[in-house]
Amino acid sequence: MTDHERHLGLYRQMQLIRRFEEEAARAYAQGKIGGFLHLYIGQEAIAVGAVAALSASDYVLTTYRDHGLALARGMSPRTAMSELFGKATGCSQGLGGSMHFFDVEHNMLGGYGIVGGHLPIAAGTAFASKYRGDGRVSVVFFGEGAASIGDCHEAMALSALWKLPVIFVCENNQYAMGTPLTRTLANDDVTARAAGYGMASDRFVCENVHQVMEHFDLAIKRARELSEPTLMEIRTYRHRGHSMSDPGKYRTAEEVEEHKRRDPLVVSRTALEKAGLGDKLTELDASVETEVQDAIKFADDSPEPGPELLAATTYKGAFAR
Ligand SMILES: Cc1ncc(C[n+]2csc(CCOP(=O)(O)OP(=O)(O)O)c2C)c(N)n1
């Protein structure tokens, strides 16, 4: 595969996530999606770059802002959209919704709503991998708002002590709901604490998808070959509010526009256009559009979860089996 072909593939994945979520936002406004909906728009290069550097058998876990990672990992847009619509054809049979994507086939182990609560799970999967000697790496994504949660410290302290093959990735989008970083952390360098745990660290501003891949290559090598954890902090920015119910009034329009100009998706598009691949981009965009519209139609036409599912997923159902 040539470098351009590889880049086009990465672009397509980012564009798929972007368009999937823009359509999900529209469906939310139409009342087709209930509950919470946290969009990953602006941060796509992180999930796509990380997944490109990982092996299919590695484990990934993330927060409630999980659609991008699931799609990057290979979940079909049909399955993902159906989950958002609360339909039986969704990845969690419509019972989990936006925050609880889960996909065993692609080793995407959630989708978690409790801030910081999923980091110990990643320490656990990494412990299992080390114990079994299966060579798998666990990667867990979290926001800077989770960085001071107790679970976060416990997971990192034990992972360093036990030398577990895990990568802790703080996607620092600079706001925890409406609270800016300056009001939650006295030292805004999340990786500064890695020294205290006795763990390697890496910190950078996300500019493009290739750069993300390169940083992950190093951390994955450290985990896979040396069985050592890494704390990574990636500065990024979400273009939308915290969730659909947040108009994001705590940020100025200028600040948002400034970040949109540096959007890694646009960076990729511009580079590919400059390389003379404009026609190819038009073709890819059209195929993404078809895939997303197909996902909406599939989710619309899919059945609601019925009572049979309820019984099988309760204790009574479990005992009855
Ligand atoms: C333990 C816990 N406390 C509070 C909340 C409510 N809550 C949901 S998201 C959020 C902000 C988290 O921000 P951050 O970790 O920076 O991630 P981001 O949403 O920016 O991706 C909070 C406080 C929660 N879900 N869990």
Image (tube, helix red, strand yellow):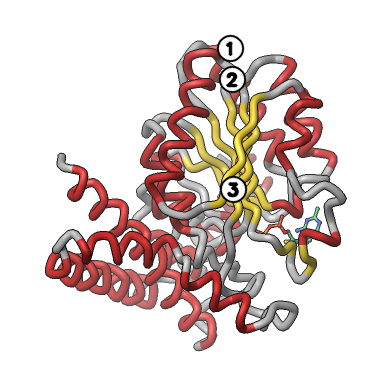
Q: 30 or 90, which is in the foreground?
A: 30
Residue ID at (29%, 76%) = 293
Callout 3, which amino acid?
Answer: Ile
The CA distance from mark 1 to mark 2 is 5 Å
Judge by depth and name the residue closer to the eye, 240 or 20: 240
- The earlier-in-sequence mark between 1 and 3 is 1
Q: Mark 1 points at which residue?
A: 131
Q: What amino acid does circle 1 point to? A: Tyr
Q: Are marks 1 and 2 in contact (CB under 8 Å)?
A: yes
Say above or below: 152 vs 186. Answer: above
Q: How crowded is mark 1: few (under 14 residues within 10 Å), some or many (20 or more)?
A: few
Q: Name the residue under label 3.
A: 234
Q: Which residue corresponds to mark 2?
A: 128
Quarter of the image with the N terminus is top left
Q: Does the residue labelled 2 lie within 8 Å of ligand 1?
A: no
User: Percent position (x, y) of residue 198?
Assistant: 74, 21
Q: What element carries label 3?
A: strand
Mark 1 to mark 3 CA distance (whole Å): 29 Å
Quarter-of-image position of residue 91: bottom left
- Identify which residue is drawn at 57% across, 45% down: 204
**In 3D space, how far apart are the residues under numbered discs 2 and 3 (Cα atoms)?**
27 Å
Q: Residue furthest bottom?
A: 30
Residue type pointed to by label 2: Ala
Does residue 102 lie above or below 273 as drawn?
A: above
